[in-house]
Image: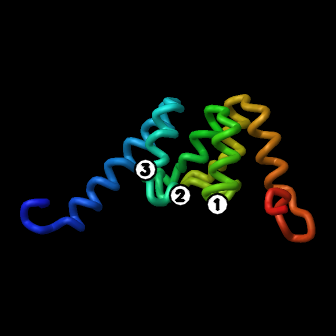
Amino acid sequence: ARSNGKQSVVDYLERANIEKKCYDAFNHGRKEEALRLLKQVKDPRSVKNSNNFTILHCAAYHGWLDVVKDLINDHQFVPDCKDNDGNTPLSKARSNGKQSVVEYLETALTMVDGRRLLDY
């Protein structure tokens, strides 16, 4: 495609490949690789599988509290986003016994005067 002057197609394919590699690293618990690839992703919220299982779900499942905080605070992930099966990052952290992530997400979802605590 590059030789035919279709740079936009090449750019799209390269971006999609990075997003897939990033998702796979998050999904399989390869934290260093996931964070390295995350820096190359244009919109981290678009990194998910066909079931809408996001990298926030993955980070919560693996108990990566620092990453969960960064995705919510720096990349505007919605803490209670649901995949197509109704799973939330909180439910994934809870099912995998990641108590520090559970506590953080419960706090993040607490409302004060109509605003999440993490917005303050």
Q: Please name whichever residue, 84 or 36, is drawn nearer the observer in this view of the structure.
A: 36
What residue does disc 2 label? Answer: 45
Query: How far from the left and from the top, in percent, is residue 42?
Result: 45, 59
CB atoms of marks 1 and 2 within 8 Å: yes
Instruction: For label 2, count other residues whose C-alpha is less than 10 Å away and answer few (under 14), some (14-19) or many (20+).
Output: some
Query: How far from the left and from the top, in percent, is residue 64?
Result: 65, 35
Specify whether 102 is left or right of 37.
right
- Can you say whether 49 is above or below 24 in the image? below
Of pointers 1 and 3, the one earlier in the residue sequence: 3
Quadrant of the snapshot with the C terminus: bottom right
- What's the mark number on residue 90? none
- What's the mark number on residue 76? 1
SS at mark 2 in the image: helix
Instruction: For label 3, count other residues whose C-alpha is less than 10 Å away and answer few (under 14), some (14-19) or many (20+).
Output: few
Quadrant of the snapshot with the N terminus: bottom left
Q: How many marks?
A: 3
